[in-house]
Image (cartoon, rainbow, N blue to C red):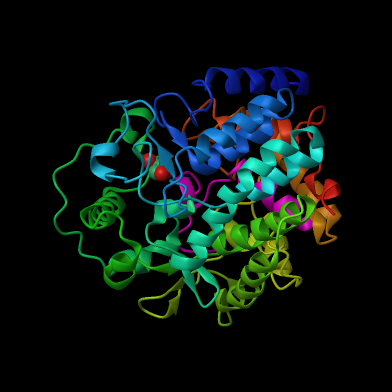
Amino acid sequence: MTDAATRDTEARAILANNDRGGYTVPTHGLYPYQWNWDSVFAAAGFAEHDMDRAWTEIETLFSGQWDNGMVPHILFHQVDPGYFPGPDIWRGTGPIPSSGISQPPIAATFVRWLLDKDAAFEPRARALLPKLMASHRWFMDWRNEDGAIVVTHPWETGRDNCPDWDAPFAAIEPEGVDAYYRRDTTHVVEEERPRRWDYDRYLHLVKLGGDCGWDEAHLRQVTPFRVADPTMTFTLLRASRDLRDLAARLGEPTAEIDGWIASMERGAETLWNDDAQTYDCLDIRSGKHTGVISNASFLCWFAGLGNDRMLAHYDRIAAAETFFVPSTDPAHPAYEPKRYWRGPVWAMMNMLIATGLGEAGHVDRAEALTENTRRLIAENGFAEYFDPRDGAPAGGRNFTWTAAVWLAWASPTTGGTPWARSS
Ligand code: DGY
């Protein structure tokens, strides 16, 4: 086990080494561009030692916002042949070459936390407010199914290959995809990455969007993949509460945001799967729940849903392996403890889950999750994700968001409890 002060120094060095000037890459090689929610976590890490740089990270992200309000999941600031699919495949239509989908909208939450940390940055929050409003409005206009937030590509949730997509993907025949050469498996062993079967369908959906210029009205009609998801619904609901707080603090109107919150509070209930007794995904095309208990299911407290329906599952799953929270329930037949979102533990998801638990009054559980994640990183370093059985590092190394959540939350010296700061 490496001591905390050494890990603090390493974490700051990772942020510095992944800094490309105004934005960070998630890790050198595997992900050489700016990713949306990775950057927001990065900002929380920078905030530990450089507030100005923290705000810049989020401002650079919003410099890629499209006219329709969408904030892309990847900004291709400088072309890098080490990543596929690049800007020529995505054909984004924004001010900076980009992908055509978004990612979990956690920015308003972290902007609020940055402002809590130092109110002197209020002018920068004020400048971001209309951009945050536009990005939430885009979700409510285009990705809203009865108040639950849908995705049109698995990459939009960040949970690229979780078992939730297995059934919706089985219904897709990935036609029209040109021959392609994956680059991710030149950086990471195949057993820790999605399968070819998944990639064929990822690329089919990218082509569908690119071919229509990412026309959301058209995609809503034609896409075979339209799935309401807890990651998106719970983070947008939570971020809308924080956006409301920000707007009120800055003396700006809040009525529109109140409407979004009320709508998503109702919509979240459509993600409740009564048979499996869990929040999970709802496939809009088939009308079926996916039946997977994932780490996203446990964002229900982060969303402020005000119920403890997931608590028994949480306790069972937290006790199942040495490290938690695994991205898929170990009791699910599709659980694979080393393969990306089909089992591994993700430290940044743990930060959000612990925050929600703490805010909901489950402080012992929040502290146990913090302590478990602290040990995971102290023993195994700053990997992209970890095997829940023994903490073995997996995926990319020297990873920005793992370093950032160490500094902002899990480190015993520099970290803290976001739930204690929120009102
Ligand atoms: C990837 O390339 O694996 C990314 O997760 C896509 O966003």
The quarter of the picture showing ligand 1: top left
Residue 93 visible in the shown view? yes
- Give the residue at x 54% y 38%: 38
- Give the residue at x 37% y 63%: 166
Q: Is residue 146 magenta?
A: no
- Give the residue at x 68% y 62%: 303
Tell me where the magenta segment starts and ends, as one range: 330-357
361 to the left or right of 105? right
In this view of the protein, which residue sits in the foreground, 124 or 109?
Answer: 124
244 to the left or right of 236? right
Q: Quadrant of the C terminus?
A: bottom right
Q: Is residue 352 magenta?
A: yes
Q: How many marks?
A: 0
140 to the left or right of 347? left
Residue 153 image offset from top left, x and y in percent = 37, 57
Residue 336 visible in the shown view? no
- Give the residue at x 35% y 49%: 100
Q: Quadrant of the N terminus?
A: top right
In this view of the protein, which residue sits in the foreground, 303 or 167?
Answer: 303
- Residue 302, picture quadrant: bottom right
Residue 277 image offset from top left, x and y in percent = 61, 77
In this view of the protein, which residue sits in the foreground, 186 or 180?
Answer: 180
Residue 359 image offset from top left, x and y in percent = 81, 57
In this view of the protein, which residue sits in the foreground, 321 or 296?
Answer: 296
Residue 184 image offset from top left, x and y in percent = 34, 35
